[in-house]
Image: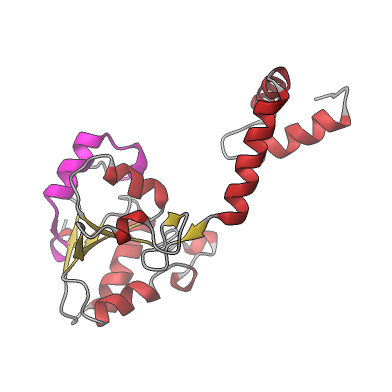
Amino acid sequence: MEFSSKLLEKAVNEMSQLPGVGKRTALRLVLHLLRQPADQTNLLASALQTMRSEIKFCKSCHNISDTNLCDICANPHRTEDIVCVVEDIRDVMAIENTSSFRGLYHVLGGKISPMDGIGPNDLNIASLVEKVKQGKIKELIFALSSTMEGDTTNFYIFKQIQGLDVVTTTIARGISVGNELEYTDEVTLGRSIMNRIPFESSLKL
């Protein structure tokens, strides 16, 4: 792809680093920004810079937040002893959109995937196990995607807390095996949360 401007080429190259954005899509987006008023582009750039420099991770659940404790963990009306284990912020948003869950979350920050070089120590698993050991959690809901990596992560955590005083459940398999949680429709996801089953039972499926 030939460019008449090095500045344009650099912007396209940077934009194409985003997931799912190829060079042609990146060029279309950059040209769109060029057609917009300068103030609008500056607002976008400023918002991205501010987000990158000021965003925090909740000290309790590791959710993305503007403060040290996210709004969900700080909400006194949430059920503190039921914790839903998810992969990332997108899954928190997906479950929250169902309005079917009033407990708290624990964001792992990924899934165990040896092929990608991601092990248990690369995820927020130790802090979750520590919460369980402290007796703060009565029920742990595994809500990772129904993939090999998700099931491996669920099983690893299950083995780490086995013998501790906590009930482990997993969302019902109304969600197709192999599907990512964020793409599941809200009705199906909501029913899966409401009709969760003991994790041990899922091992027999």
Asked which quadrant contains residue 152, the reply is bottom left
Extreme residue toward the top, this view: 35
- Image side of residue 173 versus residue 43, left or right: left
Q: How many marks?
A: 0
- Image side of residue 116 versus residue 73, left or right: right
Q: Report x, y in % for residue 86.
A: 33, 56
User: Is the N terminus in the top left, top right, bottom left or bottom right quadrant?
Assistant: top right
- Closest to the observer: 194 or 80? 80
Q: Report x, y in % for residue 72.
A: 31, 55
Above-or-below relation of 64 to 13: below
Can residue 16 be seen here? Answer: no
- Image side of residue 113 versus residue 175, left or right: right
Q: Report x, y in % for residue 9.
A: 81, 31
Residue in the picture at 50% in, 64% down: 118
Asked which quadrant contains residue 164, the reply is bottom left
User: Is the C terminus in the top left, top right, bottom left or bottom right quadrant?
Assistant: bottom left
Can residue 29 be seen here? Answer: yes
Q: Report x, y in % for residue 12.
A: 74, 32
Q: Is residue 179 magenta?
A: yes
Above-or-below relation of 121 to 72: below
Residue in the picture at 56% in, 35% down: 20
Q: Is residue 142 magenta?
A: no
Q: Write the start and end of the magenta stretch as one range.
A: 177-201
Magenta span: chief secondary structure: helix
Residue in the picture at 44% in, 58% down: 110
